[in-house]
Image (cartoon, rainbow, N blue to C red):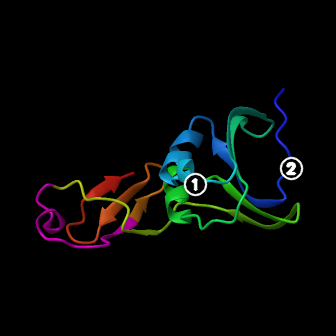
Amino acid sequence: MINVSKLKKGIVIDHIEAGHGYKIFSQLGLDALEDVVVLMRNVPSRKMGKKDLIKIETDIHLDLTVLGLIDPNVTINFVKDGALIRKEKLQLPAVVEGILECKNPRCISKYQKINDIKFYLIDEKTKEYRCEYCDTATSF
């Protein structure tokens, strides 16, 4: 069994659905960090069977909206001086801005430069969002 040391300071992204860890790792740009980052895949879990886990040994700003879109069931643990100081449970965001792109080829956002289009959650099960301009359903 691999032994990964306890964090003194940093962030642990826990309860990642097995197989989603690398997607989160890539979307957050963790490969560009100079600090220690550990991605563990298929870790045994009593609750989930198997899970992925990411440990980041530094304080960085995480885009929780992106994390909520990729895997809304993750837990973010903030660690300082070796102790858990805060825990956040994520969920699908009700509004997403600047991340998704409308799939309607006739949407005005395809022809005009519009920054930060808002999408509104319409179905949690399918992770579908509605474009603020043309009401087309788009999923992540």
Q: Which type of secondary structure does the marked residue at label 2 adopt? A: loop
The vertical placement of 118 against 82, above or below, is below
Q: Which mark is residue 91?
A: none
Residue placed furthest toward the top? 1
Q: Mark 2–mark 1 contact, CB under 8 Å?
A: no
The mark that comes first in sequence, 2 or 1, is: 2
Residue placed furthest toward the front? 34
In this orientation, which residue lies closer to the viewer: 38 or 84? 38
Amino acid carrying label 1: it is Pro
Number of callouts: 2
Spot occupied by residue 10 in the image (x, y as percentages of width and height): 74, 60
Spot occupied by residue 60 in the image (x, y as percentages of width and height): 63, 65
The vertical placement of 99 against 15, above or below, is below
Q: CA distance from mark 2 to mark 1?
A: 25 Å
The vertical placement of 98 against 38, above or below, is below
Going by the image, does 61 lie left or right of 103?
Answer: right
Residues shaded magenta: 105-120
Asked if the magenta segment contains residue 79, the reply would be no
In this orientation, which residue lies closer to the viewer: 111 or 55? 55
**Residue at which label 2 appears:** 6
Going by the image, does 7 lie left or right of 126?
Answer: right
**Residue at which label 1 appears:** 72
In this orientation, which residue lies closer to the viewer: 78 or 17? 78
- Camera-near label (2 vs 1) is 2
Amino acid carrying label 2: it is Lys
Residue drawn at 31 percent across, 55 percent down? 138
